[in-house]
Image: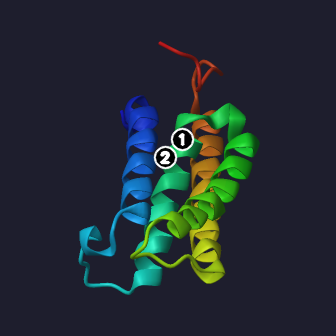
């Protein structure tokens, strides 16, 4: 069931992350965790969603998400209340990579359990 919603969820998460990253600092949501944990967790979810949404293109998705994490961090140069840092981009890229690995494991498990041998076929 979750696989049906993976594509819209992935793109929605990306839009949300983009908004939170480049919007003024006052619009950043308050959480109970550290900022690094927030960044990492957001990108783990993003990587997982994209890996589930595009299982056949996982290598391209990996490259684009990791480059995208750095690019989105770079966009903070255009927001006066934000400050981009290489450390932040690294945390985001690592989170995306972990999410992609988790998604790849789930996709391989799906393939091994598919009764018809077509786990990624469109309905």
**For the residue carrying disc 1, how many other residues have a C-alpha within 10 Å: few (<14), some (14-19), or many (20+)?**
many
Q: Which residue is mark 2?
A: 49
Distance from disc 2 to disc 1, alpha carbons, whole Å, reads: 5 Å
Residue that appears at 25% across and 74% down = 26
Q: Which residue sits at x=44%, y=40%? A: 11
Q: How many marks?
A: 2
Quickly name the residue at label 1.
52
Position of residue 102 in the picture relative to residue 23 (left or right): right
Residue closest to the far top? 123
Mark 2 Cα within 10 Å, few/some/many (few <14, many 20+)? many
The answer to whether 57 is drawn above or below residue 48 in the figure is above
Q: Position of residue 64 (x, y in %)?
A: 68, 48
* Percent coordinates x, y for residue 98 in the rendering: 61, 65
Q: Quadrant of residue 50?
A: top right
Residue at 43%, 73% (x, y): give it. Answer: 80
The answer to whether residue 4 is above or below residue 94 is: above
Between 19 and 35, the residue placed more toward the observer is 19
Find residue 119 and report its image quarter: top right
Identified at 44% across, 55% down, the residue is 18
Give the answer, above or below, for where 86 lies relative to 51: below
Query: SS of the residue at dot 1?
Result: helix
Quadrant (top left, top right, bottom left, bottom right) of the N terminus: top left
Callouts 2 and 1 close, C-beta under 8 Å: yes
The answer to whether residue 29 is left or right of residue 112 is left
């Amino acid at each position: 069931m979750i696989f049906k919603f993976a594509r819209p969820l992935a793109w929605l998460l990306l839009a949300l992350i983009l908004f939170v990253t480049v919007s003024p600092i006052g619009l950043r949501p308050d959480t109970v965790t550290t900022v690094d944990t927030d960044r990492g967790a957001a990108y783990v979810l993003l990587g997982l969603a994209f890996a589930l949404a595009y299982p056949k293109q996982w290598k391209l998705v990996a490259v684009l998400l990791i480059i995208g994490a750095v690019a989105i961090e770079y966009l903070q140069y255009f927001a006066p209340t934000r400050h981009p840092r290489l450390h932040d981009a690294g945390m985001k890229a690592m989170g995306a990579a972990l999410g992609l690995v988790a998604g790849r494991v789930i996709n391989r498990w799906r393939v091994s359990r598919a009764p018809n041998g077509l786990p990624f076929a469109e309905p």
